[in-house]
Amino acid sequence: MPFNIPILLTWLRVALIPLVVGVYYLPEHWLPLADRNLASTLVFIVAAITDWFDGYLARRWNQTSAFGAFLDPVADKLMVAGALLVLVQLDRVNAIIAFIIVGREITISALREWMAEIGARKSVAVSSLGKIKTAVQMVAIPMLLFHDPIFTVLDMHMAGDILLWIAGVLTVWSMFYYLRRAWPLIKEKSGAL
């Protein structure tokens, strides 16, 4: 397993995931809900920044590796799934949209793994649509974690909810995009079985 700054940042993101979720399990007299919202939001934002920064540094310093390519999306998916689960529990996110997002991640991860096994991983490489979906999620989730209005002007919950539904539409769209790209190989390989 290689060890460098980009991989260290990815491991940091993995370590931050329990903090995003765990802060909501602190007793109310230790940390009021508004403070928990703020703490969880800040930790999520730091984790999201490491997501961008580790990829940037890996490319810039030519420190990309197979392990980093594996760990980075795992960390992203764990971070999003953990945040969505706590948001569903707090009744800030509809369970259906959380299921759609998490279900898509599992489906596409399995598809990519299978495509890699048959030597066709590039046909389901990350697309710009997938990147847009991720960016919208990474903006929506901290808004929903923060939950409270900012300066009584911007309703963070409503803005985050709208963005998460947009992310849900992009999630389904990108899933069908990847499945359509993989379909010829799926048909070919299933016919050979």
Image (tube, rainbow, N blue to C red):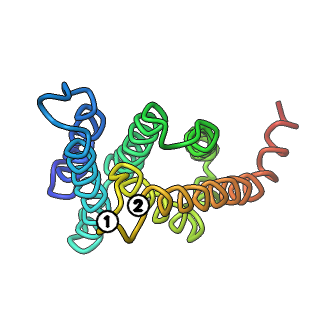
Quarter of the image for the C terminus: give it: top right
Quarter of the image for the N terminus: give it: top left
* Residue lying at the far left of the rendered structure: 30
Q: Position of residue 140 (x, y in %)?
A: 45, 59
Quadrant of residue 53 within the rendered picture: bottom left
Tag of residue 150: 1
- The amino acid type found where label 2 is placed reads Met
Residue at horizontal 31 percent and vertical 57 percent from the top: 48
Q: Which residue is mark 2?
A: 156
Report the side of 56 relative to 138 (left or right).
left
- The amino acid type found where label 1 is placed reads Ile
62 or 43: nearer the viewer: 43
Tag of residue 93: none
Q: Position of residue 40 (x, y in %)?
A: 26, 45
Report the side of 71 relative to 40 (left or right).
right
Q: Taking 190 as reference, is 80 above or below it?
A: below
Disc 2 on helix, strand or loop?
Answer: helix
Do we see residue 113 in this rendering? Answer: no
190 or 50: nearer the viewer: 50
* Residue lying at the far right of the rendered structure: 191
Disc 2 to disc 1: CB gap under 8 Å: yes
121 or 119: nearer the viewer: 121
